[in-house]
Amino acid sequence: AEELGSWGAEELGSNSQFGYPLIFAGGQTATSNPEPYADFFDFIALGDGEELLPEIGLVIEEGKAAGLTREELLLDLAQVPGVYVPRFYDMAEDGSVHPNRPDVPTRILRRVATPIPAYSIGLVPYIETVHDRLKIEVRRGCTRGCRFCQPGMLTRPARDVEPENVVEAIEQGMRATGYNEFSLLSLSCSDYLSLPAVGMEIKNRLKDENISLSLPSQRVDRFDENIANILGGLRQSGLTFAPEAGTQRMRDVVNKGLTNEELLKGVKTACEQGWDKVKLYFMIGLPGETDIDVLGIAETVSWLRQECRISGRKPLNFNITISNFTPKPHTPFQWHSVSTSEFVRKQELLREAFRKTKGVKVNYTDVRISAMEDFVGRGDRRLASVLSRAWELGAGMDSWWESLDRAFAAWEQAIAESDLTWKYRLVDKGEWNVMAGTDTGDRQNRAYDAPLPWDHIDTGIEKNWLIADLQRALEAATVPDCSFEGCSHCGICGTDFGHNIVIDALPIPKFAGHYQPNTEKVQRLRVWFGKLGDMRLVSHLDLVRLFDRAVRRASLPITFSGGYHPGPRIMIANALSLGASSTGEIVEFELTQPMEVEEFKEKLESQLPSEIPVYRVEAVDLTTPAATRLLERGEYTVTIAAVENTAAEQWQDWVEQILAREVIGLEKRTKSGKKQQVNLREWLFELELVEVKEESLPQAAVLRYVGSCRNDGTLLRPEQLVYMLEQLTQQEFQLLNIHRYQLILGEE
């Protein structure tokens, strides 16, 4: 990262006049069509990075040693297959891109690499993140040939990972990270033929550790009892299928390769195996779609719900996501154009159709997001000024609902200022419909031969094959998956990109049964710990997860609760406010096997960050009430700032006045919403002035107090001490810092 991201002028050589780092991009969007972003990057990495990034690093390292100028270094990088340097290419009037010097390739090759599961074992965050689990890639690439799917075209050929490597990576990764969930990743995970065998083997090996498996959206036609067994259990994960279209004709048009019978069989299997809710993905606005096809989505969902009824159980519920189709580069539908006004109309059709359907929740993608996807996704270098201006006007986090209005207004203004309003209007009305008519003789009229802004990116798929596949879509003709049937002659297979690697299915191990939590309590250990430094910013729930993962990594024999969602018996005495530090927290662990106190302390400490210090550990009798029930008081120091300058004597006078009061009331609301009057003074046991920081602006004082800290709601929070001061003085104060010194337990 240091080699790639930091390149000052002095590092580039004495001839350099540039004092900023090299900026580069990679990933799916950059590989498909980098032109709208070309002006912002020095180079772009195309395709898989496992082998490409080390090569880039080597070129940069050698360039630094040789004292190359920026131009010379970028020229060297342009010779690396998979590296696109936009400054060495110009856009013609027709939007096509060509080299502006003879010593760079005319077309830039997309790189292909085989996934390495061991690379998935990395850093574990202290806070909850999206996809907060161990993620292992089992298959890269997809040859299903769905005509709308850009990843399916840009990741060919398909490459399976050896099952033994997957199992080893998962077993090591779960114990090294402490996660309680792992996910097997692939564009079409069910096409990894050893999925049931790998999943079952891991489930059996980690049977006693409360581990669950999740899978991304998978092929409903491959979902069976074997996959259900590896997904099921006490913590059953969600289940997602993507039929994409509501009628058989439309599924054939997009080459989904899914029949109504297969769809019903997969959903019915899920219902029979215990799932009561299934998530389904559909799209609207696909080429050749009619209103009958749109309404077919609602009809299909109602049909599935009716057919999957099981006596004695409540009906199957569905969570439906309706996305707006946007054509993507390097797909057969790249010549099609969407119409956002049609999106709006079709969404209303579905809203009306689903209005009376019970047990179905429907989510719709905002049409404005789809408009921007289409406008930018298939644009050329003229869009650079639009992107820059939209950002200046406040675009960003555009898909977040609270940012969408602002972002869309910024995009509209940026488009208007760039004189590209005419182009955006085509997105609204639909530039042209590739399915309007069936004349296949005049390719020129179809604009198939017109250059595209991404033609200089060599993905391996021949453009003529994409045109031929589009013609097959016009006839609703399907193409088989070349990983398992005959070659479709797309042009991928060869020396540059390799061939499909499909590993035969392994025998499925005998199912050892679902996890049964060990609820036996043999020992309880009480731990006093601190929460310092940056760990102050870790929430209470994240702290619970942190302890859970530390216990797993340390292989401590933790007891689990019973019930439908068993959890480790880790009991933190009281939740500390976010941002507060502490040297007096208490947590208790219940174990299934006795351990020496020092051994437990050593193992636990080894898996905790330094800013969660463990001060002492002691064994507690199992018959003793837990610390959460014994907790009585908490001792704090708080730093409070006064808006106006105040003498030290005044602070001391305020402290004495508070202590002299018998009643300082506060109106609270209970969880049920009822108003309740409480006397905060009854919850305050000790209060003293520690110091006045007269040099601080505004002036601040440090106070120490001991207050009620019970888990029944009788808790004097630092904010309430500030409230007491404000009620007394009729002034405004600001709480600057909170530190909890200790939690005080009552009689056992």
Image: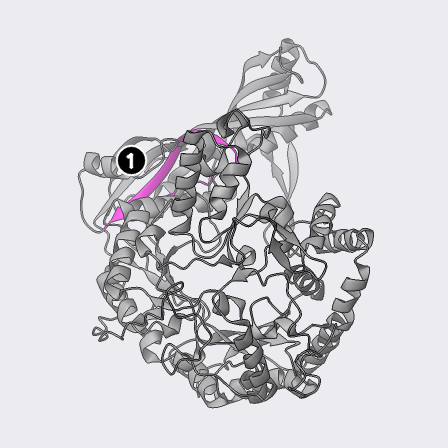
Left or right relative to 185: residue 622: left
User: Dot 1, crowdedness within 10 Å: few (<14), some or many (≥20)?
Assistant: some
Question: Residue 738 location, x and y as percent?
Answer: 53, 28
Q: Nearer the viewer, residue 283 or 682?
A: 283
In which quadrant of the rendered image does the C terminus lie?
top left
Please give the residue where the numbered disc 1 appears in the rendered image. 605
Quarter of the image where the N terminus is located = top left
Q: Main secondary structure of the magenta part?
A: strand
Q: Position of residue 401 (x, y in %)?
A: 67, 57
Residue 272 versus residue 170 in the image, above or below: below
Q: Residue at x 41, y 59 (%)?
A: 112
Whether residue 246 is visible here, answered yes or no, is: no
State which quadrant residue 57 falls in. top left
State the SS at label 1.
helix
Q: How many marks?
A: 1
Residue 439 drawn in magenta: no
Q: State how the image is colored.
A: one colour
Look at the image and give the residue range highlighted in magenta: 572-591
Q: Is residue 589 visible?
A: yes
User: Percent x, y for residue 234?
Assistant: 35, 66
Amino acid type for the residue under numbered disc 1:
Glu
Q: Position of residue 61 (x, y in %)?
A: 41, 35
Residue in view at x 60 percent, y 33 percent:
720
Q: Is residue 601 left or right of residue 571?
A: left
Magenta stretch contains residue 585: yes
Q: Is residue 404 above or below residue 532?
A: below
In the image, residue 574 sits, relative to residue 385, either above or below, namely above
